[in-house]
Amino acid sequence: MSEVSVFRQYAKEAMRDSSKAASEAEKRTLEALACTWAQASLLSDRVFGSSWSPSERSVSNDQKKEASQNHREG
C-alpha cells in the first residue's frame, strides 16, 4: 500500500470515528485530524506521485512558450 493510500485510509478512519465521538470537542478534533491526513495524502501524491500535473494557471507564459518551442524542435 502506498503512502498516499495509507494517509487516505487514516483520513477515512478519523472521519468515521468523528461520527462516533462522545463529545463535540472530540468530534471537531477528529475532523481536524481527518483534514490533516487528507492534506498529507494530497501533498504526498503531488510530491512523490506521478498522477499530479500542473494546472493551466500554475504554468507561466514563459514556460508555455519554452514547452512549445521544445515541442517544435524535438
Image: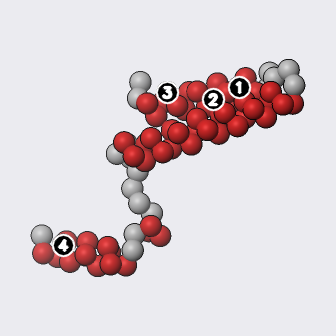
| Marks 4/1: CA–CA distance | 49 Å
Vertical order, 35 against 46 (above or below): above
Residue drawn at (41%, 24%), measured in percent from left and top?
A: 1
Identify the residue position indicated by label 2 in the image. Answer: 12
Where disc 1 sits, the SS reads helix
Q: Say left or right for 72 vs 5.
A: left
Between residues 40 and 52, which one lies in front from this camera angle? 40
Where disc 3 sits, the SS reads helix
Residue 15 sits in quarter: top right
| Marks 4/2: CA–CA distance | 43 Å
- Residue 64 in the image: x percent, y percent? 32, 75
Label 1 crowd bin: few (<14), some (14–19), many (20+), radius 10 Å: some
Label at residue 43 = none
Where disc 2 sits, the SS reads helix
Residue drawn at (65%, 34%), measured in percent from left and top?
A: 34
Q: Amino acid at mark 3?
A: Val
Label at residue 6 = 3
Identify the residue position indicated by label 1 in the image. Answer: 16
Labelled pair 4, 3 in contact (Cβ < 8 Å): no
User: Between disc 4 and disc 3, whose residue precedes?
Assistant: 3
Label 2 crowd bin: few (<14), some (14–19), many (20+), radius 10 Å: some
| Marks 3/1: CA–CA distance | 15 Å
- Residue 5 in the image: x percent, y percent? 48, 30
Q: Amino acid at mark 2?
A: Lys
Vertical order, 56 against 44 (above or below): below
- Residue 69 in the image: x percent, y percent? 20, 77
Identify the residue position indicated by label 4 in the image. Answer: 70
| Marks 1/2: CA–CA distance | 6 Å
Q: Amino acid at mark 1?
A: Arg
Labelled pair 1, 2 in contact (Cβ < 8 Å): yes
